[in-house]
Amino acid sequence: MELEYQGKAAVSRMECLEQHHLLWCLSYLTAKLSRTASCITRVYLSPLATRISKILVGKVRTLPSGS
């Protein structure tokens, strides 16, 4: 009975280690993705958003004010 219990404890310890490893992998990948996403946002999306907002502001200004 004692040996069986120790076996279960070892298995649960291994499962715990695997889960911690999985969590570490997930957090690492999430950090990588968020860094990549912020880089993409900074390099590509910010200038694009600036351009779009300038175009929209230009269109709003050219609309007739009487309407």
Image (cartoon, helix red, strand yellow):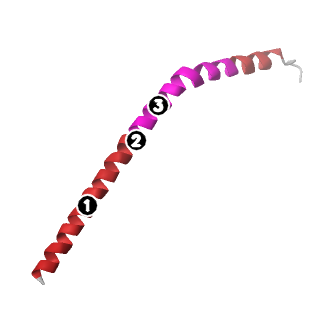
Please give the residue where the numbered disc 2 appears in the rendered image.
29
Amino acid on which disc 1 is placed = Cys
Q: From mark 2 to mark 3, how far is it between C-alphas?
A: 10 Å
Any magenta on residue 8? Answer: no
Q: Quadrant of the C terminus?
A: top right
Question: Is the N terminus in the top left, top right, bottom left or bottom right quadrant?
Answer: bottom left
**Residue 41 belongs to the span the image colors magenta:** yes
Taking depth in this image into account, of 37 and 50 the one nearest to the observer is 37
Mark earlier in primary sequence (3, 1):
1
Q: Residues within 10 Å of mark 2 (few under 14, many from 20)?
A: few
Depth check: give the residue in front, 61 or 23: 23
Task: Kindly identify which numbered label has been placed on residue 36.
Answer: 3
Residue 17 picture location, percent across and down? 24, 57
Q: In the image, which disc is placed on residue 43?
A: none
Considering only vertical position in the picture, is 19 above or below 3? above
- Quick check: marks 1 and 2 in contact, CB under 8 Å? no
Residue placed under numbered mark 1 in the picture: 16
Q: Earlier in the sequence, mark 1 or mark 2?
A: 1
Indicate the quadrant where residue 46 lies.
top right
Query: Crowding near pointer 1: few (<14 within 10 Å), some, many (20+)?
Result: few
Q: Amino acid at mark 3?
A: Thr
3D distance between C-alphas at marks 3 and 1: 30 Å
Relative to 61, is 35 above or below?
Answer: below
Q: Position of residue 61 (x, y in %)?
A: 78, 15
Residue 61 horizontal side relative to residue 38, left or right: right
Q: Within the image, what quadrant is residue 28 found in?
A: top left
Say which element carries label 3: helix
Counting from the top left corner in percent of width and height, residue 56 is at 74, 21
Residue range (magenta): 31-53
What's the residue at 63%, 19% (across, down)? 50
